[in-house]
C-alpha cells in the first residue's frame, strides 16, 4: 500500500515529503508492537501481505484511575492485522551485477505473467534479480479484537478497494496514472529472498511454509484480549480448572 503511494511521487521533493510522512506515521505508532509479518506469494501472481500489530488499549492507567499511581497501562491490547493484496507481474530477469550497476539487464524472453512460480525457481537457480510490477488491489483489517467493530470490519464490502478507486480516478482525471511500484527480488536460496523497492529499501523474507493459504483470523476473540488476560492469570496464579 505504501509502495503504491510512493509511486505517485514524480520529483525528488515529492519523494522527500512522502518519506517524511512515513516517518511521522511510524512515530505515531510508537506505542504499538509489530507482531507477525507474512507475505504469501501465490503461483497465479497474487501477493498478500499480512501485518499484525498490537496497541495498548488504555495506555496510561492513571488517566482512568487517578488514585492508582502506576505509569503503565492495562495489560490488554487492541489487536488486528492489516491485510493488503496485489497482483505481481514479472517484468525482467537480470544478473545481480546488472542490478547493482544501474538495473540495465536485458529482458528475458521467457518472462511470462502467468508463470510466477517458474520465475521464482529460475531466480533461485541462477542467482539473478527478478523485477516485478506491482498492481495494488485491496486493503482490509482482519482479526480485530474490538467488540462490535469486529463485525463491521469482517464484512468484505468494508475493505478499501484501491484498484477500483485508481481506475475511477484514471477515467476522471487525464493527468492521473495508476501507480505501479517496482520491486526487485534477489533469491539467495530456497529459504531466503531479499526484496528492494525503487528507493533501495531492503526487506528480507524467510520461507516458513510452502502453503499459499492466507491466515484465518476467525478464532481471534473480539474481547480486547480480556479473555487471554484472565486465562493467563488463572494459569499463573489461581490455577482453577473445571
Image (cartoon, rainbow, N blue to C red):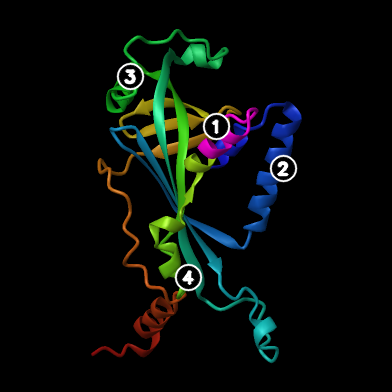
- Expressed as whole percent of the image width and height from the top left, the position of residue 97 reads 49, 12
First of labels 1, 2 by sequence position: 2
Check whether the beta carbons of the residues at disc 2 and disc 3 lie within 8 A of each other.
no
Residue sitting at x 45%, y 46%: 138
Q: Which of these two is toward me, 162 or 225?
A: 162
* Residue at the limit of the structure toward the left, as seen here: 242
Q: Mark 1 highlights which residue?
A: 178
Q: CA distance from mark 1 to mark 2?
A: 22 Å
Q: Is residue 104 magenta?
A: no
The mark found on residue 20 in the picture is 2
Q: CA distance from mark 4 to mark 2?
A: 31 Å
Check whether the beta carbons of the residues at disc 1 and disc 3 lie within 8 A of each other.
no
Q: CA distance from mark 2 to mark 3?
A: 37 Å
In the visual, does 129 lie left or right of 190?
right
In the visual, does 176 lie left or right of 139?
right
Locate the C terminus and report the quarter of the image it occupies: bottom left
Which image quarter: residue 156?
bottom left
First of labels 3, 4 by sequence position: 3
Q: Nearer the viewer, mark 4 or mark 2?
A: 4
Q: Mark 3 highlights which residue?
A: 112
Q: Nearer the viewer, mark 2 or mark 3?
A: 3
Q: CA distance from mark 4 to mark 1?
A: 31 Å
Q: Mark 4 highlights which residue?
A: 149
- Expressed as whole percent of the image width and height from the top left, the position of residue 20 reads 72, 42
Q: Secondary structure at mark 3?
A: loop
First of labels 1, 3 by sequence position: 3
Compared to residue 67, the image places residue 79 above or below, namely above
First of labels 4, 1 by sequence position: 4
Amino acid at each position: 500500500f505504501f509502495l503504491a503511494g510512493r509511486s505517485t511521487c514524480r520529483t525528488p521533493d515529492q519523494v522527500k515529503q512522502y518519506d517524511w510522512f512515513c516517518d511521522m506515521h511510524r512515530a505515531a505508532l510508537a506505542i504499538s508492537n509489530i507482531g507477525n509479518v507474512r507475505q504469501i506469494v501465490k503461483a497465479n501472481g497474487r501477493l498478500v501481505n499480512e501485518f499484525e500489530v498490537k496497541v495498548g488499549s488504555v495506555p496510561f492507567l492513571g488517566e482512568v484511575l487517578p488514585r492508582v499511581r502506576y505509569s503503565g497501562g492495562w495489560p490488554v491490547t487492541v489487536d488486528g492485522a492489516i491485510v493488503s493484496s496485489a497482483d505481481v507481474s514479472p517484468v525482467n530477469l537480470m544478473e545481480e551485477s546488472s542490478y547493482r550497476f544501474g538495473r540495465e539487464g536485458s529482458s528475458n524472453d521467457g518472462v511470462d505473467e502467468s508463470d510466477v512460480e517458474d520465475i521464482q525457481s529460475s531466480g533461485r537457480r541462477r542467482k539473478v534479480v527478478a523485477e516485478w510490477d506491482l498492481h495494488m488491489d485491496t486493503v482490509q483489517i482482519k482479526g480485530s479484537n474490538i467488540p462490535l467493530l469486529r463485525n463491521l470490519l469482517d464484512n468484505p464490502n468494508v475493505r478499501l478497494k484501491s484498484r477500483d478507486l485508481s481506475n475511477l480516478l484514471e477515467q476522471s482525471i487525464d493527468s492521473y496514472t495508476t501507480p505501479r511500484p517496482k520491486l526487485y527480488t534477489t533469491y539467495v536460496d530456497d529459504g531466503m529472498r531479499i526484496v528492494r523497492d525503487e528507493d533501495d529499501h531492503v526487506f528480507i523474507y524467510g520461507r516458513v511454509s510452502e502453503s499459499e493459504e492466507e491466515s484465518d483470523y476467525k478464532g481471534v476473540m473480539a474481547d480486547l484480549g480480556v479473555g487471554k488476560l484472565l486465562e493467563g492469570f488463572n494459569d499463573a496464579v489461581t490455577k482453577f480448572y473445571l
